[in-house]
Image: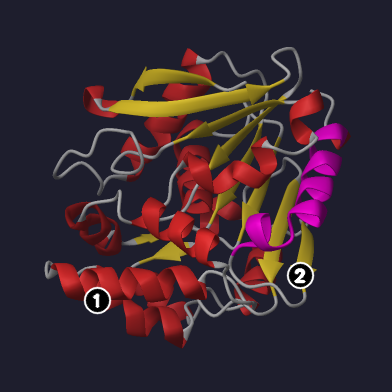
Amino acid sequence: MSRTHKVSGTGGVSLHVVEAGNPNGRSILFVHGVSFSHLAWRKQFESDLADDFRLVAMDLRGHGFSDKPVGAYGDSRIWADDVLAVLTSLELDQPVLCGWSYGGFVLTDYVRHHGESTIAAVNFVSSVPRLGEPLLRGGFMGADFLALMPGTLSEKTDESAGSLLAFARKCVHDTLEPAELAFFLGNLVMTPQHVRLALAMRQEDHDAVLSTLRRPVLLTYGDDDVLVRPATGEHMAGLVRHATLSRYPGVGHSALWEAPERFNRELRRLRESVQI
């Protein structure tokens, strides 16, 4: 049975947080990607991970059931402090942090401002090391994502909806079943246009931050990801020399959804390997 929490983030923004699993187990904090929500982790929360671990997933500000203010997304410290607020409020002791796509970047925001002393390990899932122009210069984004991006930021409802539908389909390598497509699209439309636009405007380069990581790191990347190029995983591994790079053939941007048995097994191994 899941439990919900309201956590006060930076500037008093209310963050929606969901918890499930073994309340006495070692913790894992899940952070979703752009325009998704805690619901993206359904296949983890409904797995045997819940038998042994305390599973916590937050809705980022502007997403899901969290508050969606205007003009509160540009500062790296905001994101870092939101994560800190969740760790502190729920008293998460040395959690493993698991961040998918933009969620992985938020975890790097956290390390940038708060270091590693409060965490056990990090799993970056199809994540990127940079945002904005630094990201584009690195060639990390797939052509499919770049083509869709203007439409997802549009104020025109029909254009935005069509682009979000196409984005949902491209989050996986194979075809989504109708119920899965509806589930993905339902997540995506909960995030308003002003939030997606604000996130697209962020300009950050976290290469240097990633190179300081000393805790165990797992890098999870799909070989058939058309949104974040698979070479991004190699770049991340070059920055975090001790990291384990796990590549998923036949998988796109969403290993957590497309290959949940392997994904959950590897996440379990990471959590069990760190005793703190």
Rendered view: 267 above or below 24: below
Q: Position of residue 244 (x, y in %)?
A: 80, 57
Give the residue at mark 1: 151
Disc 2 designates what residue? 248
Which secondary structure, mark 2? strand
Label ID, residue 252: none
Identify the residue at image location x=86%, y=33%.
272
122 lies left or right of 71: right
Q: Which residue is at the front of the view, 141 or 132?
A: 141
Q: Kindly report the distance in space between the C-alpha atoms of the residues bearing marks 2 and 1.
A: 29 Å
**Label 2 sits on what residue type?**
Tyr
Specify whether residue 247 is in view.
yes
Q: Secondary structure at mark 1?
A: helix
**Mark 2 or mark 1, earlier in chain:** 1
Amino acid at pointer 1: Gly
Report x, y in % for residue 93: 65, 18
Which region shows up in magenta?
Answer: 254-272
Q: Is residue 257 left or right of residue 195?
A: right
User: Residue 154: in sight, yes or no?
Assistant: no
